[in-house]
Image (tube, rainbow, N blue to C red):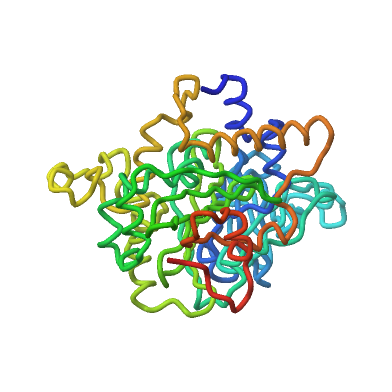
Amino acid sequence: MLRTEINELLTQTGPGTRMGDLFRRYWMPALLAEELPDDDCAPVRVKILSERLVAFRDSQGRYGLVDEFCAHRGVSLWFGRNEDSGLRCAYHGWKYDYTGQCVEVPSEPETGNFAANVKLRSYPLVKVGDVLWTYLGDPEHQPPLPEWEFVRVPGEQTYTSKRWQECNWLQALEGGIDSSHVTFLHSGNLNTDPLFKGSKGNEYNKNDVKPFFEVAENEGGLLIGARRNAEEGHYYWRVTPWVMPNFTMVPPRGDHPVHGHFWVPIDDENCWVYTFDYHPVRALTTAEVDAMKAGLGVHNENIPGTYRPVANKDNDYLMDRDAQRRGEMYSGIKGIAIQDSSLQESMGPIVDRTKERLVATDAGIIKARQRLRKAALALAEQGTPPPGLAPEHQRIRSASIVLPADQSMLDGVRDAVVARPGVAQTTV
């Protein structure tokens, strides 16, 4: 169980909270680049870490992320006109540039300095790969731009999607570092989903339902190893990296692309899940990209024009009890992403962790909570920068590997979990 006050510390990420202050030391995904496709396109509402903002791309291609509300009367600038290198409020015509600086107030004399003294809260918005990233913290502490491999490989080697998940960020993330549920919840997908099938690792997953977990601290977070029996005298290891605060990466299967997630708080009861697939050494095939766009693998199908899944809590995730009985889908829900989100959302917006009973397979979850709490308190009380900020902490991979029974996990995967350009992933 987890005490209520610790649960609150870990789940609350708004301005002025300890976990919110920790999140504000990192670059976070704010949008997919596809959401602002052209200069002077329509602005987009952005809510992140409980802050309501609006993003736009100006006439010169510069990205802006500013307070959603006009400084005049508090009107939402989402209704504004994106034109002539600025966003103009639709109510009285006040205009702001991409930094949030007011550049024009039509009702005031041009000779005055009124507009120059008006500036909205704003944050940097930078395109790296197919994601637009923002940093909401003190500029003095702004870290280097993201170095995650999925946004640094050529564009034809990577694909990213996004979905709205209706629960707190932490219970969503905890699903991403829990390898034991794969044998049950996703068992129907391992040999049927085109982005998973054909891997020898699938046999190990299905034949050993009692994995042993080993968790090792890494500079940026944790390496969470799930060990299953393989051939005599060998173990099959699936090693999941968690990099603070909210990056997880799923161990690969065969030559399929590698995938993972960013779990980004919208507010304390909702989060964005950014899901990526990439291959370190080859372009994604047309069939792979088509499957991802169709919601296969770890992606999902969204309601057109939104990032809300078609299968959601309002329609009971389109559960099919007949398919569940036939054994086609263990939970009766289609798709790995929605299988996960349905159960994570079923806990409620913020799960009551005082009632849970953790077991040995939850070792990664326990360690992650401890490390998050320790880092948040160290930042608040001593000003200690948290792990995961350095570029080398982000040059990381997951791995699946068969090792001799007498070889330790760390020794066996030491090189495999380091991202090296032009080197394929370590996979079974």
Can see residue 230? yes
Residue 300, image x and y in percent?
36, 56
Q: Percent position (x, y) of residue 189?
A: 28, 56
At 63% from the left edge and 33% from the top edge, which residue is drawn? 370
In the rendered image, the vertical position of residue 361 relative to residue 157, given as above or below: above
Q: Is residue 252 above or below residue 51?
A: below
* Corner quadrant of residue 31: bottom right
Nearest the viewer among 303 and 88 is 303
Residue 104 visible in image: no
Seen at 25% across and 62% down, the residue is 192
On the picture, is 37 further left or further right than 372? left
Could you tell me which quadrant the C terminus lies in? bottom left
Coordinates of residue 70 in the picture (x, y in percent): 66, 45
**Residue depicted at x 55% and y 65%:** 33
> Is residue 149 found left or right of 392 in the rendered image?
left
Front position in the image: 151 or 210? 210
Total marks placed:
0
State the image quarter where residue 411 is shown: bottom right
Front-lying residue, 291 or 378: 378
**Looking at the picture, how far across and down is residue 295, in whole percent?**
34, 60
Left or right of 202? Residue 397 is right
Please tell me which residue lies in front, 171 or 79. Answer: 171
At horizontal 54% and vertical 42% (from top left) the residue drawn is: 266
